[in-house]
Image (spheres, helix red, strand yellow):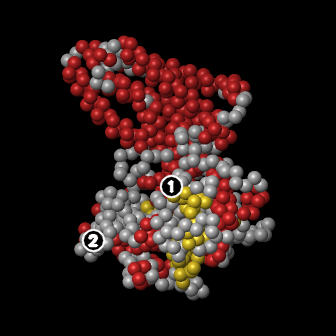
């Protein structure tokens, strides 16, 4: 090793070697984290693979300045003082991150998750931290010793760039080589910080760790603490308001805990029907002709003949809404009955709370569960979230490609995912191979920017109206073919189907461009094997977070469960409601009106018949006070349960 390090190193080579050493430090810290808490974890190869991605992000963030200093094209930096400074910067930064990782291994057993930036506010008023830390140092003396050994090894193995490197190159050659190295390094650093190069991959957050963990608790082992702190810094979006001082009063006004049975020994699930949820990308209520009979003076036909036909045999709702404006908002709302307030739930520290959802509830009742998304694994964080909420299986683009019965990667749309038509056929096929009862969910992708359809359908679905309309027609056709195939399967008549959208999208009608209109999503419940379920459009207010409670009601589920929504089919129309959040304003829909509330006061009150929201009725209606009170209870329950990890009954 000494002979290797005594050789002349170019700055880029020395940098690469030193970063490899940091990877080894992070890996040793993870192994120590596991050893300290081995009884909690199931260490797998998948955890190791996921850990590399999160380590890469943390290493590049914390060593960004060091990387820049090593590669900056400045000839005069090649001197002993400059590189001694770089070495000290490297050692100090990575010693701090090592300290954080080792210390958090001790703290884990109290929180069962990686420490996030909320720890600073959590202990901001404590005056005895010094004694606590001192005691822990003595108790965990071996961690202090391990720290010292690792830092010593890091110091000794550090590769110092050879100062002779400057003398063997002309100044301009040296600067050019450093500049090229820097330009090559920058995109790789950005990709490493984000978690990948792919178009469909958002910057990774702590919730993405669930993609590599069999259980939510294992996600802590996938992560590292520097990453968790960096990703949650300045994102403390959940502050518990004090609208209600009395807990009993708060619970009486609103509670997200549903008690399926008053019996102390609830009976098991009595109706084991399959549950299939189709989350259709951008499939707003605006595009559906059957839900817009009065639009354009009654002449509006829409772009969804197949879904219109489905609605003729289904239960739908006149006023139905999504709970957010992004795909990552729709997933928690639909599958776990968690709305989006302030920031997407998936992107907040609360995403590491103990979660439940339709999949986990039904999995406990013996259901097989699977989530389908035609994009690459990891896209949008869906695989991680689906696993965290109880889906046992996940099928994505890679799984579709591996199935010889289908077209493989030639069915990839070139940007996001497998085209909807073939992937929906794959979805139906895979369900036919599952043991009943099963619960599945599918997220489509084709009705999305850049708004294209397969080449063979370009003349079938030409440009019309706005650019998304041809995609809506294509996806509608794919949905029609899905139900045609599913109707021939033996499980079809024993299945509850729910169709909704993740959010809305482009609009060419003023009604759907208002504060509330932008949240208009369909909620369609189709139960082909139940002749007692009469098709109708009910005059109720519905929202995505109602899907979970409604399904539990349809299955006669009798145990307590968690969900912010309500059972639509067993709640009177006057008691149905919806809530969403838009640019600092909470919108609460009930009693034929929408109330807008900024967290302190009501800023708007509009009748639902005032479709363009032109007449503010604030202060004029008797129901304003009760609606504001109910909304405050919802907000306080939400914030309290997010902050205190109370997302289960």
Residue 254 lies in quadrant: bottom right
| Closer to the eye: label 1 or 2 | 1
Residue 323 placement (x, y as % from top left): 53, 63
Dot 2 falls on a residue whose secondary structure is: loop
Residue at 25%, 31% in the rendered image: 180
Question: Residue placed at 50% from the left, 23% from the top?
Answer: 92
Can residue 81 be seen? yes
Report helix, strand or loop for mark 1: loop
- 397 on left or right of 458: right
Q: Residues within 10 Å of mark 2 (few under 14, many from 20)?
A: some
Residue 137 versus residue 592 in the image, above or below = above
Rendering coords of residue 271 (x, y %): 64, 76
- Circle 1 residues within 10 Å: few <14, some 14–19, many ≥20: few
The quadrant of the picture occupied by the N terminus is top left
Q: Can you identify the residue that label 2 sits on? A: 463
Q: Give the position of the C terminus as an image quadrant.
A: bottom right
In the visual, does 621 lie left or right of 430?
right
Q: Residue at x 49, y 64 (%)?
A: 515
Residue 485, how many percent across, how many down? Answer: 41, 78
Q: Is residue 20 above or below residue 384?
A: above
Give me the C-alpha separation between circle 1 and circle 2. 32 Å
Location of residue 53 in the rendering, given as x and y in whole percent from the top left corner: 44, 42
Q: Residue at x 36, y 28 (%)?
A: 68
Report which residue position mark 1 lands on.
583
Residue 405 shows in the view: no
Asked whether, in this view, residue 325 is left or right of residue 476, the answer is right
């Amino acid at each position: 090793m000494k002979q290797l390090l005594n050789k002349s190193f170019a700055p880029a080579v020395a940098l690469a070697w030193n970063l490899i050493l940091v990877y080894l430090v992070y890996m040793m810290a993870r192994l120590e984290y596991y050893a300290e808490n081995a009884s909690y974890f199931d260490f797998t190869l998948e955890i190791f693979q996921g850990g590399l991605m999160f380590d890469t992000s943390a290493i590049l963030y914390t060593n960004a300045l060091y990387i820049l200093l090593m590669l900056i094209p400045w000839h005069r930096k090649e001197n002993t003082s400059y590189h001694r400074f770089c070495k000290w910067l490297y050692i100090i930064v990575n010693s701090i991150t090592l300290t954080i990782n080792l210390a958090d291994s001790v703290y884990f057993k109290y929180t069962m998750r990686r420490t996030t930036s909320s720890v600073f506010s959590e202990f901001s008023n404590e005056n005895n931290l010094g004694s606590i830390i001192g005691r822990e140092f003595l108790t965990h003396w071996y961690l202090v010793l391990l720290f010292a050994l690792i830092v010593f090894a890091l110091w000794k193995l550090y590769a110092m760039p050879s100062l002779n490197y400057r003398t063997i190159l002309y100044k301009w050659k040296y600067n050019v080589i450093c500049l090229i190295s820097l330009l090559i390094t920058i995109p790789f650093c950005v990709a490493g910080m984000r978690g990948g190069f792919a178009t469909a991959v958002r910057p990774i957050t702590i919730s993405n760790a669930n993609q590599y963990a069999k259980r939510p608790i294992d996600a802590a082992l996938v992560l590292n603490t520097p990453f968790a702190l960096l990703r949650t810094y300045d994102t403390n979006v959940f502050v518990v308001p004090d609208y209600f001082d009395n807990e009993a009063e708060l619970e009486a006004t609103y509670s997200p805990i549903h008690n399926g049975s008053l019996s102390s020994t609830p009976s098991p699930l009595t109706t084991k029907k399959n549950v299939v949820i189709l989350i259709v990308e951008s499939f707003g209520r605006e595009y559906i002709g059957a839900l817009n009979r009065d639009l354009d003076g009654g002449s509006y036909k829409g772009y969804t003949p197949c879904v219109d036909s489905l609605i003729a045999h289904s239960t739908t709702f006149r006023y139905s809404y999504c709970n957010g404006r992004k795909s990552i908002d729709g997933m928690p709302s639909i599958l776990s009955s968690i709305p989006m307030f302030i920031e997407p739930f998936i992107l907040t520290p609360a995403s590491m709370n103990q979660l439940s959802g339709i999949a986990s509830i039904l999995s406990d009742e013996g259901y097989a569960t699977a989530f389908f998304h035609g994009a690459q694994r990891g896209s949008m964080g869906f695989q991680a979230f689906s696993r965290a909420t109880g889906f046992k299986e996940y099928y994505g683009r890679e799984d579709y490609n591996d199935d010889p019965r289908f077209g493989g990667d030639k069915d990839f749309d070139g940007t996001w995912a497998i085209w909807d038509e073939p992937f929906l056929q794959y979805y139906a096929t895979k369900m036919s191979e599952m043991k009943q009862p099963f619960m599945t969910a599918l997220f489509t992708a084709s009705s999305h920017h850049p708004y294209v359809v397969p080449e063979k359908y370009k003349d079938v679905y030409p440009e019309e109206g706005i650019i998304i309309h041809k995609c809506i027609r294509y996806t509608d056709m794919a949905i029609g073919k899905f139900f045609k195939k599913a109707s021939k399967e033996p499980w079809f008549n024993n299945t509850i189907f729910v169709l909704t959208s993740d959010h809305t999208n482009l609009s060419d009608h003023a009604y759907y461009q208002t504060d509330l209109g932008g949240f208009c999503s369909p909620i369609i419940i189709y139960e082909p094997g139940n002749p007692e379920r009469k098709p109708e459009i009910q005059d109720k207010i519905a929202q995505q977070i109602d899907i979970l409670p409604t399904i539990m009601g349809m299955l006669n589920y009798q145990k307590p469960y968690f969900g912010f929504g309500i059972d639509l089919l067993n709640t009177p129309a006057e008691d149905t409601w919806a809530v969403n959040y838009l640019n600092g304003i909470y919108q609460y829909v009930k009693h034929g009106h929408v109330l807008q509330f900024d967290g302190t006061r009501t800023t708007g009150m509009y009748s639902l018949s005032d479709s363009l929201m032109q007449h503010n009725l604030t202060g004029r209606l008797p129901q304003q006070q009760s609606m504001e009170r109910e909304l405050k209870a919802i907000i306080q329950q939400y914030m309290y349960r997010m902050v205190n990890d109370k997302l289960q009954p």
